[in-house]
Amino acid sequence: MRIGVFDSGIGGLTVVKPLLKSKLFEKIIYFGDTARVPYGIKDKNVIIRYGLEAVQFFNNFDIDLLVVACNTVSAFAIPQMKLQANFEIVGVVEPGILAIQNSGADFNSEILILGTRATISSNIYQQKLMEIGYSNIQAIATGLFVPIVEEDIFHGKILDATKEFYFNNLQKHPQYIILGCTHFPLIADEIYKFFYRKNEKKLNLIHSGDAILEYLIEKYPNLKPSKSEIEFFASENPQNLKNIALKWLQN
Ligand code: DGL
């Protein structure tokens, strides 16, 4: 199967990593809209327009499926994108919800959703979780993590201050954290460290990349091992994206 992976920037690389490792996809074409990142502070119509432009980009390639590795686009633009695409499209929200269900979280578990302002205000995660019975849900927009990660900052004072700014006033301590933005797995260890408490019940981080791989394996049971080539495109400074990809995908 030949797939495209699309994100506003480098965040979708966190989705590429498990897809590439699985060796189940013969070709992966990555496109990061680095010229216009971040999407998470834009309004719905702009996000839909950017999603449709990504479809036009991928219509030039021979792919079977597009993975929208961006929660913000997944929250707003999937139905519109499907209408214009020559290929199937999956977003990351459904797989994220499935991953929570498969992780063993019971309906009383304390769930924290982190995402961009657009994703959190769309309410998509909150609604879907409530529909299936979860009720202890907190959600916070933590969009500042996006430019921090795009700046190649994964540790240190700026990140520490940002974590404190966002997390210090949380009402309840989470047991499950949905990393509802594909940039956030790049700082997953930092988020984990902040919330980890010795002698406390487990802390689980739900990651779109692992979630989507599980979802695709279930949806396409005939996927066969193959050599897995990857090609990178970006709307600005593709070399920078390639450099980060090389670093991130290696370890
Ligand atoms: N990585 C994207 C997401 O999953 C968006 C980040 C942004 O562009 O604001 O939501």
Image (cartoon, rainbow, N blue to C red):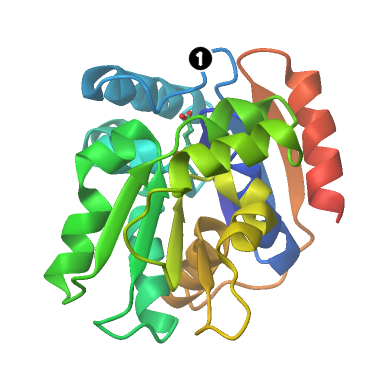
Please determine whether, in this image, residue 198 is positioned above or below residue 6.
below
Q: Is mark 1 within 8 Å of ligand 1?
A: no
Give the x, y percent position of residue 35.
57, 12
Taking the spot 74% from the left edge, 27% from the top edge, the residue there is 241
Q: Quadrant of the N terminus?
A: bottom right
Residue 61, can we see it?
A: no
In the picture as drawn, the residue positioned furthest to the left comes out as 131
Give the x, y percent position of residue 238.
74, 20
Using a 10 Å C-alpha cutoff, classify the residue at mark 1 as few (fewer than 14 neighbours), some (14 to 19) or many (20 or more): few
Give the x, y percent position of residue 111.
35, 67
Taking the spot 63% from the left edge, 55% from the top edge, the residue there is 188
Dot 1 amino acid type: Arg
Residue linked to disc 1? 36
- Residue 126 is left or right of residue 22, and the answer is left
- Residue 231 is left or right of residue 234, and the answer is right
Please determine whether, in this image, residue 29 is positioned above or below residue 132.
above
Please determine whether, in this image, residue 151 is positioned above or below residue 70.
above
Taking the spot 86% from the left edge, 56% from the top edge, the residue there is 251
Which is nearer the eye, 202 or 170?
Answer: 170
Residue 160, can we see it?
A: yes
Q: How many marks?
A: 1
Which is nearer the eye, 248 or 150?
Answer: 150
* SS for dot 1: loop
Image quadrant of residue 235? top right
Give the x, y percent position of residue 200.
53, 83
Which is nearer the eye, 163 or 225?
Answer: 163
Image quadrant of residue 34? top right
